[in-house]
Image (cartoon, coloured by chain):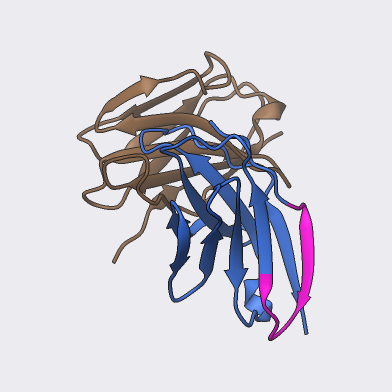
Chain colours: A blue, B brown
């Protein structure tokens, strides 16, 4: 499994865009990238998944450069309710033992 | 629709007792996962089921831990002779088919060993 590195924490203010970059230098050819969000006392929730270029859904965008050695989760116009831990995972389609590291704690302030 | 349901939501027990944690996955989800999360930490993978089969049990911390899944649905995680270091939140997730499918998590069972 590719090792991932992401910042431990990030602070932001309501209405701003938050970008969290995850490094995965040894990503394999068939690995995909998935992001989850976790609120206190809840299980993680799937946000977005991608393989290359850009993926966008109603919640976030995922930017993946051509070399795929990193990826950036972009949260547009955050609100206080976006305060959570965000996890970046990298794995192949048949990798069931995905690694949820420490994640990035995002704190949104008023 | 109904999500992943875990019970009990909280469990307090004495050291040395056995505990059983239950997970009801989303109907139709063939894959089921158990994780453990200690306070302020990431998720530690415990075991994965595809249908009723668990191809890899190496994530279970010790032989006091066991898990089963019957009828391709409900799963139970059993911890025998609990120790204080077993205190954590135990999370269950399910997904459609392949591991690449997004996992849907329950809210966990918070286990406290006195």
Q: In this view, does B29 lie to the left or right of A49?
A: left
Asked whether residue A8 is drawn in magenta, I would say yes
Quadrant showing the N terminus of chain B: bottom left
| Residue situated in front as seen by the camera: A88 or B53 | A88
Q: Position of residue B108 (x, y in %)?
A: 52, 49
Image point 49% across, 73% down: which residue? A59
Of all residues shown, which one is farthest toward the top? B63
Question: In which image quadrant can residue B33 be found?
Answer: top left
Q: In this view, does A86 lie to the left or right of A1?
A: right
Q: Is residue B19 depicted above or below A103 in this figure? A: above
Image point 53% across, 17% down: which residue? B64
Q: Where is residue A87 in the image (x, y as percent from the top left)?
A: 60, 52
Image point 42% across, 33% down: which residue? A95
Asked whether residue B44 is drawn in magenta, I would say no
Quadrant showing the C terminus of chain B: top right
Q: Where is residue B96 in the image (x, y as percent from the top left)?
A: 28, 47
Q: How many marks?
A: 0
Question: In which image quadrant can residue A14 be found?
Answer: bottom right
Image point 42% across, 36% down: which residue? A92
Q: Where is residue B72 in the image (x, y as percent from the top left)?
A: 22, 36
Q: Give the range drawn in magenta.
A: A7-18
Q: Is residue B77 visible?
A: yes
């Amino acid at each position: 499994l590719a090792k991932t590195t992401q910042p431990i924490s990030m602070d932001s203010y309501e209405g701003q865009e938050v970008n969290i970059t995850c490094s995965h230098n040894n990503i394999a050819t068939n690995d995909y990238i998935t992001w989850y969000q976790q609120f206190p006392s809840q299980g993680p929730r799937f946000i977005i998944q991608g393989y290359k270029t850009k993926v966008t859904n109603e919640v976030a965008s995922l930017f993946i450069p051509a070399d795929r050695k990193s990826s950036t989760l972009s949260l547009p116009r955050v609100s206080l309710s976006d305060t959570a831990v965000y996890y970046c995972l990298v794995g192949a389609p048949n990798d069931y033992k995905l690694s949820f590291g420490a994640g990035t704690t995002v704190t949104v302030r008023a | 629709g109904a999500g992943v349901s875990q019970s009990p939501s909280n469990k307090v027990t004495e050291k040395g007792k056995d505990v059983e944690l239950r997970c009801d996955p989303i109907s139709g989800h063939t894959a089921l996962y158990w994780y453990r999360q200690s306070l302020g930490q990431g998720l530690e993978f415990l075991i994965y089921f595809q249908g009723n089969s668990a191809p890899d049990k190496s994530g279970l911390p010790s032989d006091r831990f066991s898990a089963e899944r019957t009828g391709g649905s409900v799963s139970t995680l059993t911890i025998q002779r609990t120790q204080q270091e077993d205190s954590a939140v135990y999370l269950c997730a399910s997904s459609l088919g392949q591991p690449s499918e997004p996992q849907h998590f329950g809210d966990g069972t918070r286990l406290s060993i006195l």
